[in-house]
């Protein structure tokens, strides 16, 4: 089932940026010159290849906002919503009361048409110095009346907290029926990881750059005992990357240079890092596999051939032809 996610907020709050950052794997620098969204823009994504998401990105200029609450549009926009994100530019303090009053109208329409929807106020652009704090914003928004069921969450594309938050929410939309498929995928990855004595084996959805599933060595697992560390692994995007932090910076640069996500044809890229080969290999236009394997345990030829052998099974489980 397609899950409908509604993004609203004043113009310039960061809605379109958020959508493209998380669901297209783009970074802020690549998104700086977005044109203002006119009216409602809908899109469909396959988040991590595990959930079909349809986004409703509602342009936030006054003339559009007014239209959303007319009889003809209100029902269409607010029906069947699973998650509602109200995006606030926390540094745009002059327009806070404007944003509060529009929020309240949206809140009421949402309660009417999608009473079960998750309702999240993103206190966004939290990286900016002159921002209002989350607590202050929450207080301001609920000054006139309490807002039951609304969560206030700090968010920034710059600090990557936005990706973590949206991914956490989207992950809750993965249906139980996917569990069996995920288990099978995990088995294939665990086997491949063990066979090559790798540290990490990860399957990546190229559209959003996010991990679909991954296997890690017992040694690495032992190091990831902290909650932060495992969160970090779970919500990383291939561009922000991977396990030991010292590897990350270097990798990000290399990925950028290779335009990893953009290239539709990339056979295999090998990096040598400390004592490991880091190999990224496309197993399909839509799917890549990432492996970190110590020099001592396998040659690049061996690694590539094992990946090639495992690929058909992985694609079959993911139902990709
Ligand atoms: N500093 C900062 N700027 C952001 C962030 N998110 C979006 N922006 C910028 O805010 C501006 C408006 O973004 P846009 O997505 O077009 O807003 P929309 O009108 O709500 O769709 C753009 O210049 C973005 O680069 C963020 O987390 N931090
Ligand atoms: Mg926009």
Image: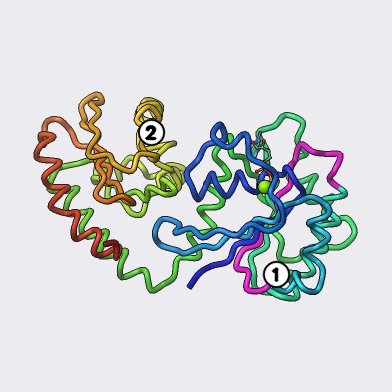
**Disc number for residue 232:** none
245 to 198, vertically: above or below: above
Q: Secondary structure at mark 1?
A: helix
Side of 127 relative to 172 (left or right): right
The quarter in which the C terminus is drawn is bottom left
Between 224 and 95, which is closer to the camera in this rendering? 95
**Disc number for residue 78:** 1
Q: Secondary structure at mark 2?
A: loop
User: Dot 2, how many residues are within 10 Å of its Cα: few (below 14), some (14-19), or many (20+)?
Assistant: few
Side of 302 relative to 264 (left or right): left
Between 301 and 245, which is closer to the camera in this rendering? 301
Q: Where is residue 202 shown, x and y percent of the image?
A: 29, 47
Sequence-first tag of 2 and 1: 1
Determine if the magenta segment contains residue 89. yes
**Disc number for residue 259:** 2
Q: Where is residue 288 shown, x and y percent of the image?
A: 29, 46
User: Dot 1, how many residues are within 10 Å of its Cα: few (below 14), some (14-19), or many (20+)?
Assistant: many
15 to 292, vertically: above or below: below
Determine if the magenta segment contains residue 38. no
Q: Residue at x 66, y 61 (%)?
A: 84
115 to 61, vertically: above or below: below
Q: What separation in Å lies between label 2 and label 1 (alpha carbons)?
A: 38 Å
Q: Residue at x 43, y 43 (%)?
A: 237
Q: Residue at x 19, y 60 (%)?
A: 313
- Image mark count: 2
- Span highlighted in magenta in the image: 77-96
Ligand 1: image quarter: top right
Q: Using the rendered view, name the quadrant where residue 213 is placed.
A: bottom left
């Amino acid at each position: 089932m397609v899950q409908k996610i509604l993004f609203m907020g004043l113009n310039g709050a960061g809605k379109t940026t958020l959508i493209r950052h998380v669901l297209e794997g783009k970074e802020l620098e690549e998104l700086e010159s977005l044109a203002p969204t006119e009216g409602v823009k809908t899109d469909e994504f396959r988040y991590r290849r595990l959930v079909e998401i349809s986004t409703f990105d509602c342009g936030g200029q006054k003339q559009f906002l007014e239209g959303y609450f007319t009889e003809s549009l209100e029902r269409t926009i607010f029906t069947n919503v699973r998650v509602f994100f109200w995006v606030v530019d926390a540094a745009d303090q002059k327009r806070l009361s404007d944003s509060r009053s529009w929020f309240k109208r949206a809140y009421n329409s949402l309660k009417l048409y999608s009473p079960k929807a998750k309702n999240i106020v993103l206190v966004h652009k939290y990286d900016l110095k002159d921002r209002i704090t989350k607590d202050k914003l929450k207080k301001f928004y609920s000054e006139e009346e309490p807002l039951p069921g609304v969560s206030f969450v700090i968010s920034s594309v710059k600090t990557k907290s936005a990706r973590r938050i949206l991914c956490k929410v989207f992950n809750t939309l993965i249906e139980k029926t996917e569990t069996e498929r995920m288990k099978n995928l995990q088995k294939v990855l665990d086997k491949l990881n063990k066979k090559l004595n790798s540290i990490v084996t990860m399957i990546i959805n190229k559209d959003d750059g996010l991990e679909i599933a991954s296997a890690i060595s017992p040694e690495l697992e032992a190091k990831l005992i902290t909650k932060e560390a495992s969160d970090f692994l779970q919500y990383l995007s291939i561009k922000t990357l991977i396990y030991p932090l010292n590897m990350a910076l270097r990798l990000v640069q290399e990925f950028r240079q290779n335009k990893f996500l953009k290239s539709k044809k990339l056979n295999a890229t090998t990096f040598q890092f400390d004592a490991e080969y880091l190999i990224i290999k496309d197993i399909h236009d839509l799917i890549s596999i990432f492996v970190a394997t110590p020099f001592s345990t396998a040659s690049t030829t061996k690694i590539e051939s094992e990946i090639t052998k495992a690929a058909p099974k992985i694609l079959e489980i993911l139902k990709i032809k």
